[in-house]
C-alpha cells in the first residue's frame, strides 16, 4: 500500500496532563518495515504515547524522531505525507459519503484547490477494497455502524500512503474476520507500524516486537515470545495465565485462568 517506511525513535519521552503524569521517560524504536505493538492495561499510557508520536500531545521532555528529524519541528504538510494515524473514537460525524472520507487521505499530496485525479480515485477504490468496504463507497459515513466506520478510517489512513502508520486500537468494533483482515494488511505493508492493541494473542501473532506499558512506564520490551510470560501477566495485568507456542503458527498463545486471580505486583 505504501512505497517506503520510516525509522521512529522515541527517546526519554515524559508526558503530563496538569499535575498527572501520563508516561515517564519512555524510549522505544520502530525500525523501517517493523510492526511494533504497545500493550498494557487501561490507563497505562499507550494512547498518550501515541498522541506524542502523531503530534497531538507535546512531550514535557524527550524527543520523537522520524527518520532522524524531530517530529515536532517538521512542517505540517511534510508530517502529513509521512505519518498517518487511526485514533480511538476518531469517527467524527462527517456529513460526507464514504469515498469522500477516504479521499481526505489524499489531501497532503495535493496543492490547495487541486481536484481528485484518476490516480487519487484508483487509490481510494483500492484502499476501500482492501478493508472490504468497496460496497460502502456511496453510503453516508454518519449512517455506518461502528465497525464499518473503523474500516473506512483505516482505508483513509492507507490512502494517505504514509511511511509511518500509528494506530490506537484499530480492531475496536470489528468482528473477528475484519480484525484479522485489518491486522493482516498492516503486517503486509512496507510502512513502519506502531499499534496499540488490547488483545495479546493478536499482538503476539502480528507484531515483530512488543513494548509493555504499566502505570506510564515500560515494563518489558522485545519479541513477543520473550515478553509474554505468566509472570508478566501476573505483574502487569493481575491475572493468572499460561503461555505456550501455538501448534500451527508457533506464536505465543495466551490462555487466561479467570478462576486464579493474582494481585498486581505479586508476581
Image (cartoon, grey):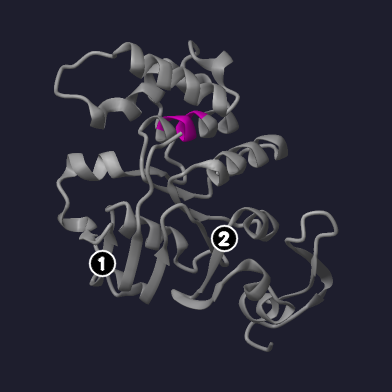
Q: Residues within 10 Å of mark 2 (few under 14, many from 20)?
A: some
Count of numbered circles on the image: 2
Which residue was labeled with disc 1?
Answer: 59
Which secondary structure, mark 1? loop
Residue 57 lies in the magenta stretch: no
The residue located at (27%, 53%) in the rendering is 55
Quick check: 99 above or below 11?
Answer: above
Residue 36 seen by the camera? yes
Residue 168's disc is none
Magenta stretch: helix, strand or loop mostly: helix
Query: Considering depth in this image, is 94 or 26 the residue closer to the camera?
Result: 26
Tell me the quarter of the picture where residue 14 sits. Answer: bottom left
Furthest residue to the bottom?
266
Which secondary structure, mark 2? loop
| Between marks 1 and 2 in the image, the one whose residue lies nearer the viewer | 2
Query: Considering depth in this image, is 2 or 36 the residue closer to the camera?
Result: 2
Residue segment shown in magenta: 152-156
Residue 95 seen by the camera? no
Query: Considering depth in this image, is 23 or 204 the residue closer to the camera?
Result: 204
Quick check: 131 above or below 98?
Answer: below
User: Quick one: label 1 or label 2, which is nearer the N terminus?
Assistant: 1
Residue 160: percent from left, percent from top = 35, 33
Residue 142: percent from left, percent from top = 46, 22
Quick check: 64 above or below 178?
Answer: below
Quick check: 51 above or below 3?
Answer: below
The residue located at (77%, 55%) in the rendering is 249
With 39 as the anchor, is 14 left or right in this view? left
Tell me the quarter of the picture where residue 179 sits. Answer: top right
Q: CA distance from mark 1 to mark 2?
A: 26 Å
Which residue was labeled with disc 2?
Answer: 208
With 83 as the anchor, is 113 left or right in this view? left
Amino acid at each position: 500500500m505504501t512505497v517506503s517506511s520510516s525509522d521512529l525513535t522515541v527517546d526519554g519521552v515524559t508526558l503530563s496532563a496538569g499535575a498527572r503524569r501520563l508516561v515517564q521517560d519512555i524510549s522505544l524504536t520502530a525500525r523501517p518495515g517493523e510492526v511494533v505493538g504497545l500493550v498494557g492495561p487501561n490507563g497505562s499510557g499507550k494512547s498518550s504515547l501515541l498522541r506524542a508520536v502523531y503530534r497531538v500531545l507535546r512531550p514535557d521532555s524527550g524527543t520523537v524522531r522520524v527518520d532522524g528529524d524531530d517530529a515536532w519541528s517538521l512542517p505540517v504538510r511534510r508530517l502529513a505525507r509521512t505519518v498517518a494515524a487511526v485514533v480511538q473514537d476518531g469517527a467524527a460525524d462527517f456529513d460526507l459519503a464514504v469515498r469522500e472520507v477516504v479521499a481526505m487521505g489524499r489531501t497532503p499530496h495535493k496543492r490547495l484547490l487541486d481536484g481528485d485525479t484518476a490516480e487519487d480515485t484508483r487509490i481510494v477504490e483500492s484502499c476501500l477494497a482492501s478493508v472490504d468496504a468497496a460496497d460502502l463507497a456511496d453510503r453516508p459515513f454518519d449512517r455506518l455502524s461502528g465497525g464499518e466506520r473503523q474500516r473506512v478510517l483505516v482505508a483513509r489512513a492507507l490512502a494517505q500512503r504514509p511511511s509511518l502508520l500509528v494506530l490506537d486500537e484499530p480492531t475496536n468494533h470489528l468482528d473477528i474476520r475484519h480484525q484479522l483482515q485489518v491486522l493482516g494488511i498492516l503486517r503486509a505493508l512496507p510502512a513502519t507500524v506502531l499499534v496499540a492493541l488490547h488483545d495479546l494473542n493478536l499482538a503476539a501473532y502480528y507484531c515483530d516486537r512488543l513494548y509493555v506499558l504499566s502505570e506510564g512506564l515500560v515494563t518489558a520490551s522485545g519479541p513477543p515470545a520473550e515478553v509474554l510470560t505468566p509472570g508478566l501477566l501476573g505483574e502487569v495485568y493481575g491475572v493468572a495465565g499460561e503461555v505456550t507456542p501455538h501448534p500451527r503458527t508457533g506464536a505465543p498463545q495466551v490462555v487466561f485462568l479467570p478462576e486464579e486471580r493474582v494481585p498486581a505486583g505479586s508476581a
